[in-house]
């Protein structure tokens, strides 16, 4: 029987057949309790006030209902209270009852006061006065018995749902640096479970998902039972409860009026009301966003441009748009990473320059942070701000032209995609107008996964050379390449080896064994940051060494990060800047973007120009068009 509720067994032989008064304390067996110990009866109690399952939050023992064989009850009758345990051990029973009530109060207080971000949880957060709690207590005291019972259950369940939503928000803030979107983010839950399976295996996925489901059900059930228990307690001690509610309400108003705080935390809070108000506004905006996006997508400055007038400044060139997963500004600016990353970028700049290549770098602002690479990719290619899944779906089912579509429209390029992170059907790939797509199953790789990453970056670039770029008598290529080795969780990661030793990738079995264990790395944020930096360095080296080895006079490389890494790496920085670089051997290619004022080399200066990622498409096409 639950510790939150306790049924009272009534004997069929109860004298007079009278129902006990259930808004008053349960009656004690003779001789076991003094009059002073009995709870004060409620003045307005009626026999039908509460059901027979009313909770006695503070009585020592169960009422003597005449059951059992030791109190005059009929032989064989069920003993009262927890199978008779409460009668045999009254002190322990009282301790359990009081303790359960305290836990119920703590749970309700926690649910009312817990923030929806991990970094905002502190002691002061839980010594505030919640306006919603005071109002709910007053409402429950004012309602008649039946509506009060219904309200207690409904509000308990609702409080549980709000608490669950806060927990979900905590996860989203930890990964995406934003709250969960009740309209647009449901698909990301499936993506999250896929990530767990690919990183920690099927058993790890099942355990994690099962744990989350059990936690959520427990929160929902226990908050409901806790509110019901506290409601019964307030009704049994109505005068005290009413005075306490009045005092707390007065204290809330006073604290709010005077702006009283504990440190930086206000004593009076209406956080849940604001939290729910923001969610209502978020839902309203999400539902209206489709109409706003439709109007934005209808505007395309190049829609009516003849094919022979498109991208004329790049005719005959191989143009590679390459995304480095999670390559964010933090890798360059963070003091803990800056020195090592700067050394890799300087080394790459020098080696490319020795091979005859020049480079220019700037900043773009991604629409996402932490995850959601496909949203960033589509923003960059479409020239539209793709900030959520609804916009992505609307985009990929529209006739909006992307950079890849425009290259294909000219008829002057073969368009291909190197997408090692794709391991299932990708119908959206057709939207981007690529002539051929090489996913993880079609790169000729026979080595191991590196956690989430199916194919190491160095092998992906070598496969591009073997499958497309290295072919003789071919037409110019426009390639979209997505390098995945720097994808979360950054453990284990591959390392650079001699390009001639790559073979079919079997060599990476040995290299993976040399790597770190993600379950160990993620116990320490500093280890996570170190592995992230090493992964970014590996991706940059894979790309720059490929250009040095295979690039020629007709090679034009545009590479960029798709988004910043998770907050564990950014240390709370919510900025969304990512580096972008153009590399070319032909001086005329870089002369066309001279007015962009980008920084020489692979590392953008801190004050280099910063654009929204959605602005790149039109600026690029303008620079390399007839008037560029």
Image (tube, grey):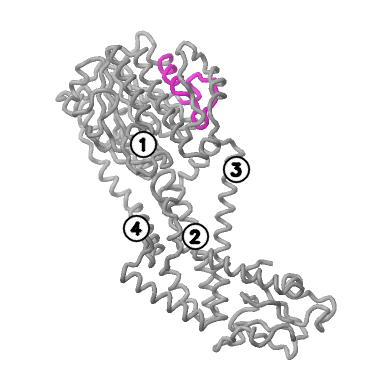
In the structure shown, which secondary structural element does the residue marked by tag 3 occupy? helix
Q: Nearer the viewer, mark 1 or mark 3?
A: 1
Q: Nearer the viewer, mark 2 or mark 1?
A: 1
Q: Earlier in the sequence, mark 2 or mark 1?
A: 2
In the structure shown, which secondary structural element does the residue marked by tag 4 occupy? helix
Q: Earlier in the sequence, mark 1 or mark 4?
A: 4
Magenta stretch?
Answer: 439-466
In the structure shown, which secondary structural element does the residue marked by tag 1 occupy? loop
Q: Which residue is mark 1?
A: 563
Q: Earlier in the sequence, mark 2 or mark 3?
A: 2
User: In the figure, residue 484 lies in which quadrant?
Assistant: top left
Q: Which residue is mark 3?
A: 206
Disc 2 to disc 1, C-alpha distance = 31 Å
Q: Which residue is mark 4?
A: 281
Please state the horizontal and vertical placement of residue 486, each as a whole percent of the image: 43, 30
**Residue ID at (32%, 48%):** 290
Classed neighbour count for the residue bearing mark 4: other residues with Cα under 10 Å, few (<14), some (14–19), many (≥20): few
The disc at residue 315 is none
Q: Magenta includes 617?
A: no
């Amino acid at each position: 029987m639950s510790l939150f509720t306790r049924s009272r067994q009534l004997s069929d032989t109860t004298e007079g057949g009278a129902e006990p008064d259930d808004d008053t304390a349960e009656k004690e067996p003779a001789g076991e309790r003094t009059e002073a110990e009995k709870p004060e009866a409620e003045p307005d109690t009626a026999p039908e006030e509460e059901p027979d399952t009313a909770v006695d939050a503070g009585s020592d023992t169960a009422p003597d209902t005449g059951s059992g064989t030791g109190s005059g009850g009929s032989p064989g009758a069920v003993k009262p209270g927890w199978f008779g345990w409460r009668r045999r051990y009254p002190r322990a029973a009282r301790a359990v009852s009081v303790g359960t009530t305290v836990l119920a109060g703590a749970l309700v207080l926690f649910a009312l006061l817990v923030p929806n971000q991990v970094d905002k949880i502190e002691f002061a957060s839980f010594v505030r006065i919640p306006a919603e709690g005071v109002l709910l207590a007053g409402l429950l005291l004012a309602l008649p018995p039946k509506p009060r019972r219904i309200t207690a259950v409904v509000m308990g369940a609702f409080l549980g749902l709000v608490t669950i939503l806060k927990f979900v928000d905590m996860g989203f803030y930890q990964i995406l640096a934003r709250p969960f979107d009740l309209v647009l983010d449901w698909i990301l839950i499936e993506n999250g479970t896929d990530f767990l399976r690919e990183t920690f295996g099927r058993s790890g996925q099942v355990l994690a998902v099962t744990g989350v489901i059990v936690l959520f059900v427990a929160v929902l059930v226990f908050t409901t039972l806790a509110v019901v228990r506290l409601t019964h307690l307030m009704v049994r001690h109505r005068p005290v409860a009413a005075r306490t509610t009045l005092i707390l309400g007065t204290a809330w108003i006073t604290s709010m009026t005077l702006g009283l705080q504990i440190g930086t935390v206000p004593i009076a809070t209406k956080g849940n009301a604001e939290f729910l108000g923001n969610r209502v506004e978020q839902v309203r905006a999400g539902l209206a966003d489709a109409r706003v996006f439709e109007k934005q997508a209808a505007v395309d400055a190049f829609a009516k441009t003849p094919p022979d007038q498109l991208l004329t400044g790049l005719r005959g060139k191989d143009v590679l748009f390459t995304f480095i997963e999670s390559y964010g500004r933090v890798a360059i600016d963070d003091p803990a990473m800056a020195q090592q990353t700067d050394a890799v970028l300087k080394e790459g700049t020098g080696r490319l320059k020795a091979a005859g290549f020049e480079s220019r770098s700037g900043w773009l602002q991604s629409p996402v942070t932490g995850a959601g690479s496909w949203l960033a990719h589509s923003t960059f290619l479409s020239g539209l701000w793709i900030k959520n899944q609804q916009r992505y779906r609307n985009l990929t089912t529209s006739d909006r032209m992307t950079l890849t579509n425009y290259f294909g429209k000219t008829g002057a390029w073969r368009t291909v995609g190197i997408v090692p992170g794709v391991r299932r059907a990708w119908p959206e790939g057709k939207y981007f107008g690529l002539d051929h797509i090489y996913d993880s199953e079609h790169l000729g790789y026979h080595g191991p996964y590196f956690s989430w990453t199916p194919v190491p970056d160095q092998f992906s670039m070598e496969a591009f050379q073997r499958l497309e770029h290295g072919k003789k008598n071919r037409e110019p290529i426009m390639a979209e390449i997505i390098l995945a080795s720097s994808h979360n969780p950054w453990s284990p990661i591959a390392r650079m080896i001699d390009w001639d030793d790559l073979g079919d990738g079997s060599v990476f079995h040995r290299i993976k064994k040399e790597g770190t264990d993600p379950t160990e790395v993620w116990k320490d944020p500093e280890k996570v940051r170190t592995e992230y930096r090493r992964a970014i360095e590996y991706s940059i080296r894979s790309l720059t060494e490929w250009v040095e080895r295979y690039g020629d006079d007709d090679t034009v490389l545009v590479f960029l990060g798709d988004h910043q890494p998770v907050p564990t790496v950014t240390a709370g920085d919510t900025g969304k800047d990512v580096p972008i670089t153009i590399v070319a051997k032909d001086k005329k290619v870089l002369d066309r973007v001279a007015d962009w004022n980008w920084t020489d080399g692979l590392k953008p200066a801190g004050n280099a120009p910063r654009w929204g990622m959605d602005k790149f498409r039109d600026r690029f096409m303008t620079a390399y068009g007839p008037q560029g």
